[in-house]
Image (cartoon, rainbow, N blue to C red):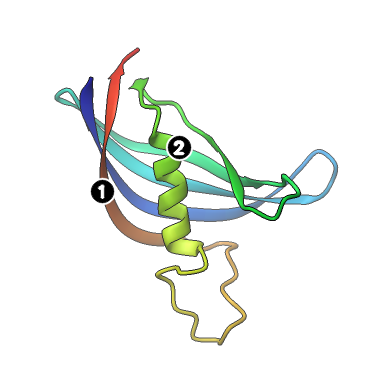
């Protein structure tokens, strides 16, 4: 196994409409990756909460990497939770109401190295 170095750059929260007509919060994570001497830039991963009914936040992550990396989904969720989770890095100047995620870009740099292998 080789090491893939991921460089996360930003989180794009947005609102989309599901087929049923109900809104569903989806976020896009912008990242670059260096794997075996090849640099891939401006890649996106989609992340949204999945309702399991047990009260524990669960997320689905969709992405397309040019190699296999089993732990990448966990890294995306970790990045998301660092920014928007209960102990996030964001500060709300309007008090405890929190932020409105629509039409915002949250730029936070984060790097992680994960084990990966070729497809």
| Residue behind mark 2 | 73
> Toward the viewer: 112 or 28?
112
- Residue at image location 61% in from the left, 46% down from the top: 58
* Whole-percent x, y for residue 24 in the image: 71, 50
- Residue at image location 52% in from the left, 68% down from the top: 86
Assess disc 1: are there few (<14), some (14-19) or many (≥20) residues with their C-alpha within 10 Å of its C-alpha: some
Question: Which residue lies most toward the front here?
Answer: 54
- Residue at image location 47% in from the left, 57% down from the top: 81
| Residue behind mark 1 | 111
Quarter location, residue 116: top left
Q: Is residue 101 above or below residue 77?
A: below
Q: Are marks 2 and 1 in contact (CB under 8 Å)?
A: no
In primary-sequence order, the first of circles 2 and 1 is 2
Quarter location, residue 64: top left
Which quarter of the rendering shows the C terminus? Answer: top left
* Whole-percent x, y for residue 93 in the image: 49, 86
Q: Is residue 117 left or right of residue 104?
A: left
Q: Is residue 44 left or right of residue 62?
A: left
Question: Which residue lies most toward the right here?
Answer: 20
Element marked by disc 1: strand
Q: Is residue 45 left or right of residue 25?
A: left
Label number found at residue 40 = none
Element marked by disc 2: helix
Assess disc 2: are there few (<14), some (14-19) or many (≥20) residues with their C-alpha within 10 Å of its C-alpha: some
Residues under labels 2 and 1: Cα distance? 14 Å
> Toward the viewer: 70 or 104?
70
């Amino acid at each position: 196994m080789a090491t893939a170095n991921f460089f996360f750059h930003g989180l794009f929260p947005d609102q989309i409409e599901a087929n049923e007509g109900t809104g569903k919060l989806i976020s896009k994570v912008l990242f670059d990756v260096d794997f075996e001497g090849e640099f891939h830039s401006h890649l996106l991963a989609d992340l949204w909460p999945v309702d399991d009914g047990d009260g524990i936040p669960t997320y689905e992550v969709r992405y397309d990497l040019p190699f296999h990396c089993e732990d990448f989904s966990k890294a995306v969720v970790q990045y998301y939770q660092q920014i928007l989770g209960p102990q996030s890095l964001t500060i709300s100047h309007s008090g405890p109401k929190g932020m409105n995620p629509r039409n915002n870009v949250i730029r936070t740099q984060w790097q992680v190295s994960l084990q990966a292998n070729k497809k």
